[in-house]
Image (spheres, grey):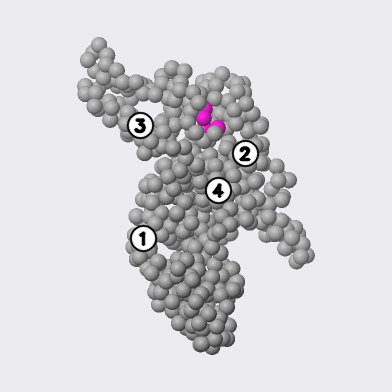
Amino acid sequence: MKKTRYLTGITTTGTPHLGNYAGSIRPSLAASRRAEVESFYFLADYHGLIKCDDPARIQDSTLKIAATWLAAGLDPERVVFYRQSDVPEIPELTWFLTCVAGKGLLNRAHAYKAAVDKNAESGVDADDGVTAGLFMYPVLMAADILAFSAQKVPVGKDQIQHIEMARDIAASFNHLYCAQQPLLVQPEFEVDEQVALLPGLDGRKMSKSYGNTIPLFAPREEMRKKIMSIQTDSKAPGEAKDTEGSALFQIYRAFASPAQTAAFAADFAAGIAWGAAKEKLFELIDAEIAPMRVRYAELIANPQEVEAILQKGAAKARAVAQPLVQAAKWAVGIRSLNYPVGQNAMFVTLPALQGYATGGQSQSAPPRFKQYREADGLFYFKLSNAGGEVLLQSTGFANPKDAAGVIAALKTQGAAALAAKAAQIAAQGDATAVQAALAELQAAEMAKN
């Protein structure tokens, strides 16, 4: 089954609340379980630096957000879950994209325009307090997406512009460097019109900026206290209450089944007391959140477990990003001088990287290992590219299973296995080409699994 690749980023500057869970986390987790979907989730800590200059807050938020997604049911074996800063290919691609992104395009970014407009209202210089990070935010976001050939990016309506800008930047790169065989996939945004947008304690949209949130994993009694403070009207017990416009009812509906929602609406019509209605809401939410709260506490107490999961995810992410960024380097002319200078056609010297243009498999023959026995009775293997050029040659093995074991390590671990297996490799070709070939093989192994 051909899968559609989805990518979602989570900025590491805060602590998730109930609105984040209902509006983003829960629907994203449901989507990740679909058989036809390949999901990438990342902690956008580089983006966090644009909004926050408190190192302790960035680190604390990274742990809490990662723990939240894992506690809520994200399966790191099924998806690619990683920290943005653990994938150096992302900032590397960012620079290539920066060199083709028009300033006029970036001038139109909503966040930058809002900052300029605010300065104009205050009568100060248009760029006062505006960092290059804020201005370049859309390029980094484009690299986040394009490095993995993501086809779909779920966003809110306020983020649609960033996906459109990523498409424009990808088109500029493809036109300039690889018009005959486009390298970068132009992503599409996906907005879920049915997503639950929860009201906060005061009836406005639940948001940290309004100070009206209900922390997702607050202790049980703290959560009850928060829910009991939701603003309601002055109707007394026994008086019929309106569900329309009721923040209490809207939050209940986001967690209830249709039958439960209908029963709660009947309670409103029958004049349920606000205290009793809030207690019902608390019990409904706590029944869903309580098991997650236990797992969340375990993860917070064991950050090394979270770190291990993120590092494993980063290895999977890099196996996908490395071949594409390597191809981008060759496209712009950053290449080994062992190959003919002045070649403008892409992939002439790295044919194994074809196919990453569409996020699919190689259009030409992929690099391959060949195991054989020589006249000395020993077993050898070599890695060749599509053109038959030998990239990697082994020493002799008395047992063919030992040779097969080294091949398996190189396939599953990629370039990371080179140092560990150095004593068993007699010679190798151009290091850049070897690493690119191993990265493609590693990505293929991941796809099979």
Above or below, comparing residue 437 to residue 157 in the picture: above
Return the residue nearer the eye: 167 or 130: 167
Say which residue appears at 57% left-offset and 32% top-offset: 183
Label 2 element class: helix
Q: Is residue 148 visible?
A: yes
* Residue 35 left/right relative to 380: right
Q: Residues within 10 Å of mark 4 (few under 14, many from 20)?
A: many
Residue 299: image tag:
1
Say which amino acid is labelled 4: Val
Q: Quadrant of residue 169?
A: top right
Q: Residues within 10 Å of mark 3 (few under 14, many from 20)?
A: many
Label 4 element class: strand
Residue 410: image tag:
3
Which quadrant would the C terminus be assigned to in this image? top left
Residue 153: image tag:
4
Residue 170: image tag:
2
Upstream in sequence: badge 2 or badge 4: 4
* Residue 298 left/right relative to 183: left
Label 1, label 3: how far apart the Cα atoms are: 32 Å
Q: Which residues are magenta?
A: 353-357
Q: Position of residue 163 (x, y in %)?
A: 61, 47
